[in-house]
């Protein structure tokens, strides 16, 4: 697929350096104003690289992909907490947006989030991938036309993500997530996948067939995608 540029690295640290170089180049050329961010273990070396650098995000508006419902920003299991811990407490941004999983009216929150995204078009969206091919919390079968919405998580995702849950908290089975269409609207996508557990999803992407059963494959319809992985794929 010509629209997808594959960068194969030796390990996550080298992958983080590649992301760093891409982001710094966009900043230098004044092409980055609105940055979509992600959570998950994949992002930790990436954010470490940024926080240990002189990158300046003080003019950048950031949007996160998703958040669990019913967990507040002070709870270490929330994505808001993760972002503060790994990035925002160490690097000032102009503004940061994360869906509010504590909102009383979740549908209203989703609509307002999508409105904010529409008024701040994404220049770059950073993405990880779930083992089942989900992007953000867009699980297999989610419509490619989806915008920010309330999502029900699959057993696969609950199983994988519950390993990271602290304090005996039960993982919520619902979350707020940017939709596939909201993500795909970003001018540029940087997708990162490390480790054997991501092989099935990466093989689907490499195979080149776009199917809702593997949400990640929708990236093939985007014209500017960079994939950074430590997986060797044929
Ligand atoms: C969660 C997030 C996804 C992320 C995925 C992978 O499900 N909602 O946005 O891509 O985790 O996480 P990890 O990087 O820990 O493998």
Image (cartoon, helix red, strand yellow):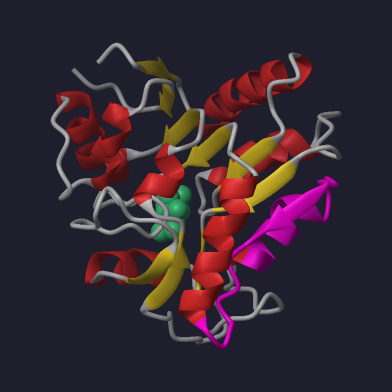
Within the image, what quadrant is residue 153 found in? bottom left
Residue 87 within the magenta-colored segment of the rendering: yes
Residue drawn at (23%, 22%) of the image: 233
Position in image of residue 21 (x %, y %): 65, 19
Rendered residue at 64%/74% (across/down): 76
**Residue 155 inside the magenta-drawn segment:** no
Q: Position of residue 234 (x, y in %)?
A: 18, 17
Is residue 174 visible in the rendered structure shown here?
yes
State the residue at coordinates (20%, 40%): 200
Above or below, 143 against 59 in this view is: below
Residue 85 falls left or right of residue 44: right
Point out the quarter of the image occupied by ligand 1: bottom left
Q: Which residues are magenta?
A: 80-105
Residue placed most toward the observer, 211 or 44? 211
Q: Is residue 69 visible?
A: no
Name the residue rendered at 38%, 60% in the picture: 137
- In the displayed structure image, the side of residue 216 where residue 61 appears, left or right: right
Left or right: residue 120 versus residue 144 is: right
Residue 90 in percent (x, y) is at 83, 49
Instruction: Quadrant for the N terminus, please.
Output: top left
In the picture shown, does residue 41 fall above or below 79?
above
Residue 220: which quarter of the image? top left
């Amino acid at each position: 697929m010509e629209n997808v540029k594959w960068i194969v690295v030796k390990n996550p640290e080298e992958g983080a350096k590649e992301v760093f170089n891409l982001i710094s180049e966009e900043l230098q050329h004044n092409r980055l104003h609105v940055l979509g961010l992600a959570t998950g273990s994949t992002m930790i070396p990436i954010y470490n690289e940024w926080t240990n650098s002189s990158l300046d995000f003080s003019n950048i508006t950031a949007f996160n992909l998703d958040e669990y419902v019913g967990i507040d920003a002070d709870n270490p299991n929330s994505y808001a907490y993760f972002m503060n811990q790994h990035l925002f407490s160490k690097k000032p941004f102009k503004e940061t947006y994360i869906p509010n999983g504590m909102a009383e009216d979740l549908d209203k929150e989703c609509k307002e989030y999508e409105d904010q995204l529409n008024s701040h078009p994404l220049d770059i969206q950073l993405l990880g991938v779930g083992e089942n091919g989900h992007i953000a919390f867009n699980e297999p079968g989610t419509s490619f036309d989806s915008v920010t919405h309330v999502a029900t998580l699959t057993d696969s995702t609950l199983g994988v993500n519950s390993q990271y849950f602290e304090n005996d908290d039960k993982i919520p089975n619902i979350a707020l997530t940017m939709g596939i269409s909201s993500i795909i609207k970003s001018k540029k996508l940087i997708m990162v996948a490390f480790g054997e557990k991501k092989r099935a999803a990466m093989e689907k992407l490499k195979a080149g067939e776009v199917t809702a059963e593997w949400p990640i494959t929708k990236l093939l319809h985007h014209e500017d995608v960079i994939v950074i992985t430590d997986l060797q794929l044929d």
